Amino acid sequence: MKQFFVGVGAIIEKDGKVLVLKRSPEKDFGANVWEVVTGRVEAEEDPKQTLLREVKEEVNLSVEIVTPIDTGFFYRGGKDYPMIFIVFWCRYLEGEVKLSWEHSEYKWLTLKKAIDDKRFSPFIERFKIIQKLKQYLPKDFKYA
Protein backbone atom coordinates (compact mmCIF):
# COMPACT_ATOMS: atom_id res chain seq x y z
CA MET A 1 0.00 0.00 0.00
CA LYS A 2 1.32 3.41 -0.93
CA GLN A 3 1.83 5.95 1.84
CA PHE A 4 -0.11 9.21 1.71
CA PHE A 5 -0.19 12.35 3.81
CA VAL A 6 -3.05 14.35 5.29
CA GLY A 7 -3.03 18.13 5.34
CA VAL A 8 -5.29 20.93 6.51
CA GLY A 9 -5.98 24.46 5.34
CA ALA A 10 -7.44 27.32 7.36
CA ILE A 11 -9.40 30.10 5.71
CA ILE A 12 -9.41 32.61 8.55
CA GLU A 13 -12.06 35.31 8.53
CA LYS A 14 -11.92 38.52 10.56
CA ASP A 15 -14.37 41.40 10.17
CA GLY A 16 -15.51 40.16 6.75
CA LYS A 17 -11.97 39.71 5.42
CA VAL A 18 -9.88 36.59 4.87
CA LEU A 19 -6.19 36.13 5.59
CA VAL A 20 -3.93 35.23 2.65
CA LEU A 21 -0.22 34.53 2.92
CA LYS A 22 2.70 34.57 0.50
CA ARG A 23 4.96 31.54 0.85
CA SER A 24 8.57 32.32 1.61
CA PRO A 25 11.10 32.15 -1.26
CA GLU A 26 12.99 29.59 0.87
CA LYS A 27 10.12 27.07 0.76
CA ASP A 28 10.87 23.76 -0.97
CA PHE A 29 7.41 23.63 -2.55
CA GLY A 30 5.38 26.53 -3.92
CA ALA A 31 7.87 29.30 -3.15
CA ASN A 32 6.36 32.81 -3.50
CA VAL A 33 2.85 31.39 -4.05
CA TRP A 34 -0.15 32.93 -2.26
CA GLU A 35 -2.13 30.59 -0.02
CA VAL A 36 -3.90 30.27 3.33
CA VAL A 37 -2.48 28.67 6.49
CA THR A 38 -1.72 25.03 5.69
CA GLY A 39 0.00 22.14 7.38
CA ARG A 40 0.42 18.39 7.66
CA VAL A 41 -1.29 16.23 10.24
CA GLU A 42 1.27 14.63 12.54
CA ALA A 43 1.06 11.08 13.91
CA GLU A 44 -1.74 10.64 16.46
CA GLU A 45 -3.01 14.17 15.82
CA ASP A 46 -6.60 15.03 14.93
CA PRO A 47 -6.96 17.31 11.85
CA LYS A 48 -8.68 19.96 14.01
CA GLN A 49 -5.73 19.91 16.43
CA THR A 50 -3.38 20.24 13.47
CA LEU A 51 -5.30 23.22 12.17
CA LEU A 52 -5.19 25.10 15.49
CA ARG A 53 -1.48 24.27 15.94
CA GLU A 54 -0.55 25.38 12.41
CA VAL A 55 -2.47 28.66 12.73
CA LYS A 56 -0.60 29.42 15.97
CA GLU A 57 2.79 28.41 14.51
CA GLU A 58 2.46 30.15 11.15
CA VAL A 59 0.64 33.39 12.03
CA ASN A 60 0.38 33.52 15.85
CA LEU A 61 -3.43 33.75 15.89
CA SER A 62 -6.13 32.00 17.87
CA VAL A 63 -9.16 30.89 15.86
CA GLU A 64 -12.27 28.81 16.22
CA ILE A 65 -13.33 26.36 13.56
CA VAL A 66 -16.65 27.31 11.97
CA THR A 67 -16.94 24.23 9.74
CA PRO A 68 -15.01 22.06 7.30
CA ILE A 69 -15.86 23.29 3.79
CA ASP A 70 -13.94 21.11 1.34
CA THR A 71 -11.64 18.15 0.84
CA GLY A 72 -9.30 17.31 -1.97
CA PHE A 73 -6.25 15.49 -3.26
CA PHE A 74 -3.02 16.56 -4.93
CA TYR A 75 0.60 15.52 -5.37
CA ARG A 76 2.86 17.79 -3.36
CA GLY A 77 5.98 18.15 -5.47
CA GLY A 78 5.69 14.79 -7.23
CA LYS A 79 4.04 11.39 -7.38
CA ASP A 80 5.90 10.22 -4.25
CA TYR A 81 4.03 12.69 -2.07
CA PRO A 82 0.26 12.15 -2.44
CA MET A 83 -1.73 14.38 -0.10
CA ILE A 84 -5.36 14.41 0.99
CA PHE A 85 -6.46 17.68 2.54
CA ILE A 86 -9.34 19.21 4.48
CA VAL A 87 -10.08 22.93 4.25
CA PHE A 88 -11.74 24.61 7.23
CA TRP A 89 -13.49 27.95 7.54
CA CYS A 90 -12.23 29.59 10.74
CA ARG A 91 -13.22 32.64 12.73
CA TYR A 92 -10.50 34.91 14.15
CA LEU A 93 -10.54 35.10 17.96
CA GLU A 94 -7.42 36.98 19.01
CA GLY A 95 -3.79 37.84 18.33
CA GLU A 96 -1.71 39.96 16.01
CA VAL A 97 -0.35 38.39 12.84
CA LYS A 98 3.29 37.42 13.31
CA LEU A 99 4.62 35.46 10.35
CA SER A 100 6.85 32.43 10.77
CA TRP A 101 9.76 31.80 8.37
CA GLU A 102 7.30 29.95 6.11
CA HIS A 103 5.69 33.18 4.81
CA SER A 104 7.06 36.53 3.71
CA GLU A 105 3.89 38.63 3.41
CA TYR A 106 0.22 38.66 4.37
CA LYS A 107 -2.98 40.51 3.50
CA TRP A 108 -6.52 40.69 4.84
CA LEU A 109 -8.85 40.83 1.82
CA THR A 110 -12.60 40.99 1.44
CA LEU A 111 -14.05 37.77 0.09
CA LYS A 112 -14.94 39.59 -3.14
CA LYS A 113 -11.33 40.77 -3.67
CA ALA A 114 -9.95 37.32 -2.82
CA ILE A 115 -12.39 35.70 -5.27
CA ASP A 116 -11.52 38.17 -8.04
CA ASP A 117 -7.72 37.83 -7.63
CA LYS A 118 -6.31 34.99 -9.77
CA ARG A 119 -3.24 34.66 -7.51
CA PHE A 120 -5.49 32.78 -5.11
CA SER A 121 -6.82 30.35 -7.75
CA PRO A 122 -6.48 27.17 -5.64
CA PHE A 123 -8.73 28.76 -3.01
CA ILE A 124 -11.20 30.82 -5.06
CA GLU A 125 -13.87 28.10 -5.10
CA ARG A 126 -13.49 27.70 -1.34
CA PHE A 127 -13.85 31.45 -0.82
CA LYS A 128 -17.07 31.22 -2.86
CA ILE A 129 -18.32 28.42 -0.59
CA ILE A 130 -17.83 30.66 2.45
CA GLN A 131 -19.51 33.56 0.68
CA LYS A 132 -22.54 31.35 -0.02
CA LEU A 133 -22.65 29.82 3.49
CA LYS A 134 -22.65 33.30 5.03
CA GLN A 135 -25.91 34.03 3.23
CA TYR A 136 -27.69 31.15 4.96
CA LEU A 137 -25.99 30.45 8.29
CA PRO A 138 -26.49 32.50 11.46
CA LYS A 139 -23.50 34.73 12.30
CA ASP A 140 -22.67 32.67 15.39
CA PHE A 141 -22.87 29.30 13.59
CA LYS A 142 -20.24 26.83 14.71
CA TYR A 143 -19.75 23.23 13.63
CA ALA A 144 -20.16 20.88 16.62
Image (cartoon, grey):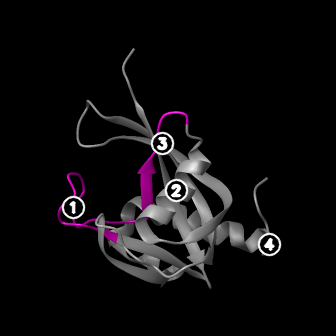
Earlier in the chain: of badge 2 and badge 3, it is 3
Q: Earlier in the sequence, mark 2 or mark 1?
A: 1
The reply to whether dot 2 and dot 3 touch (C-beta < 8 Å) is no
Q: Which residue appears at 24% of the width and 67% of the height?
A: 24
Question: Which residue does the numbered mark 1 point to in the structure image?
Answer: 31
Residue located beneath label 2 in the image: 53
The spot of residue 17 in percent (x, y) is: 55, 81
Identify which amino acid the numbered label 4 is placed on: Asp
Residue under pointer 3: 41
Viewer-nearest of discs 3 and 4: 3
Q: Are marks 4 and 1 in contact (CB under 8 Å)?
A: no
Q: Check if mark 2's residue and mark 1's residue have beta carbons within 8 Å.
A: no
Q: Which residue is mark 4?
A: 140
Tell me where residue 19 appears, x and y as whole percent: 47, 75
Q: Quadrant of residue 38?
A: bottom left
**x 54%, y 45%: residue:** 71
